[in-house]
């Protein structure tokens, strides 16, 4: 019998199977389903394609999701039972007018409760937002071989990485997502190595957003009653990543996730989503008639950007600001793109609760560490809710 299967790195394999042996994962499941007691792999797996990602799978004409993408029941997303977080976007242009204090209050309140909010008049031109979504669709719409050149290990620069899922080698169930991740070092490096289809818009998005990120960080630190000098703030948001996520239309959205439950590791994340929707956040506490633990959808609002608090800001604020757990569902009808910017500390930055807060709170909720250690831990574990924060636990 000849059979195709796909491994965690999205390599498709041709298998020749005979009784007596059972290769792991998909084949195991298939062999059980087919009541074949044992199967054997006769030939070495032969890659059918490299770097095709989930998009490549879908383009090959799937009618059902492969076994590796089927989530355990507790991770599946019941979209009918989720409500929407319908707070209107916060108008950042009002920071320059008489409503300054009220806007500062709204930002701090959102960061202390849900850890997510949307903003408008954020300084990123609306045409640029449209171009970014087009650029992401263009990049992922290319033939597999054009994208595969950015895979880890072969990419022309360590700052650019094309991949699928999060940590495919360790995940029990894969995420239904392809991505390209671009780490900013210098303009020259970005212009040389980032993909042609997206480098200009991604750089401009980064330049414009980072000004807004800095302003929001200053506001949030200020609301803690602490002043940090400019170079410290620059260090806290000194490493910047622009990602483009692509979630292909999925034949069984009820069985899969686009991104599993996780929190982001940095200070703040800025996220552009298209009009499909599907980003859910877990309520940290009871609020607006919703219970703690409920999942609420962050609706797609044209022209708005989503901002969320990351682990670093939760740690720095000694737990006052909430790094929210979030996840993304898939859809059967259309693909979705999202374009986050992760503003994270420089790897050498020393992170821990701000001493002034520890003194005031009379307790230190997290230990100190060098950010690089946190980052390495984050990227070597599968998404598992807010588990990433355990790395900073005191004991
Ligand atoms: O696609 C989204 O809406 C969110 C993606 C996300 O959470 C992430 O990339 O960390
Ligand atoms: Fe995230």
Image: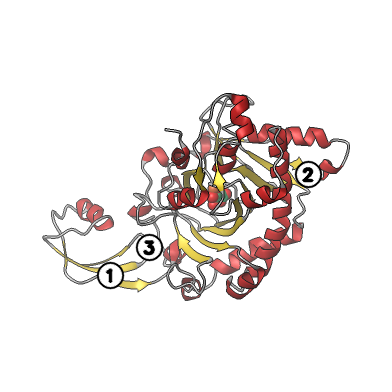
Measured as percent of width and height from the top left, residue 57 is found at: 42, 64
Q: Nearer the viewer, residue 116 or 349?
A: 349
Numbered mark located on residue 9 in the image: 3
The residue that appears at 46% across and 75% down in the rendered structure is 145
Q: Is residue 162 left or right of residue 107?
A: left
Q: Nearer the viewer, residue 83 or 272?
A: 272
Measured as percent of width and height from the top left, residue 20 is found at: 11, 60
- Is residue 304 visible to us here? no
| Quarter of the image with the C terminus in it | top left
Measured as percent of width and height from the top left, residue 171 is found at: 36, 51
Secondary structure category for the residue under label 1 = strand
Badge 2 vs badge 1, beta-carbon distance below 8 Å: no
* Few, some or many residues within 10 Å of mark 3 (<14, 14–19, 20+): some
Q: Which residue is mark 2?
A: 92
Badge 3 vs badge 1, beta-carbon distance below 8 Å: no
Front tag of 3 and 1: 3
Front tag of 3 and 2: 2
| Quarter of the image with the N terminus in it | bottom left
Gap in angstroms between the C-alphas marked 2 and 1: 54 Å
Q: Is residue 210 left or right of residue 14?
A: right
């Amino acid at each position: 019998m000849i059979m195709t299967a796909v491994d965690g790195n999205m390599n498709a394999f041709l298998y020749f199977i005979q009784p007596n042996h059972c290769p792991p994962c998909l084949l195991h499941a298939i062999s059980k389903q087919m009541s074949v007691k044992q199967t054997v792999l006769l030939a070495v797996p032969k890659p059918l394609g490299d770097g095709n990602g989930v998009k490549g799978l879908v383009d090959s004409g799937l009618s059902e999701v492969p076994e590796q993408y089927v989530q355990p029941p507790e991770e599946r997303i019941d979209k009918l039972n989720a409500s929407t977080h319908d707070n209107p976007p916060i108008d950042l242009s009002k920071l320059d007018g008489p409503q300054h204090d009220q806007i500062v209050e709204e930002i701090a309140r959102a960061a202390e409760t849900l850890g997510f909010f949307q903003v408008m008049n954020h300084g990123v031109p609306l045409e640029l937002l449209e171009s970014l979504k087009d650029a992401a669709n263009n990049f992922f719409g290319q033939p597999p071989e054009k994208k595969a050149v950015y895979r880890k290990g072969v990419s022309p620069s360590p700052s650019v990485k094309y991949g699928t899922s999060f940590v495919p080698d360790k995940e029990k169930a894969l995420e239904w997502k392809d991505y390209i991740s671009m780490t900013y070092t210098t303009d020259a490096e970005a212009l040389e190595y980032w993909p042609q289809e997206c480098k200009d818009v991604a750089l401009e998005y980064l330049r414009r957003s980072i000004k807004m990120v800095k302003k929001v960080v200053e506001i949030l630190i200020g609301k803690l009653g602490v002043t940090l000098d400019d170079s410290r703030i620059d260090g806290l948001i000194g490493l910047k990543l622009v990602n483009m996520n692509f979630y292909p239309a999925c034949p069984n959205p009820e069985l899969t996730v686009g991104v599993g439950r996780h929190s982001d590791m940095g200070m703040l994340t800025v996220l552009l989503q298209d009009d499909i929707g599907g980003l859910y956040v877990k309520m940290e506490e009871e609020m607006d008639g919703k219970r703690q633990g409920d999942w609420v959808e962050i609706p797609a609002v044209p022209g708005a950007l989503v901002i969320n608090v990351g682990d670093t800001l939760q740690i720095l604020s000694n737990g006052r600001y909430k790094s929210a757990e979030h996840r993304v569902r898939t859809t059967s009808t259309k693909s979705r793109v999202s374009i986050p910017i992760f503003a994270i500390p420089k790897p050498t930055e020393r992170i821990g609760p701000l001493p002034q807060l520890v003194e005031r709170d009379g307790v230190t909720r997290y230990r100190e560490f060098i950010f690089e250690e946190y980052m390495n831990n984050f990227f070597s574990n599968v998404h598992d809710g807010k588990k990433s924060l355990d790395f900073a636990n005191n004991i």
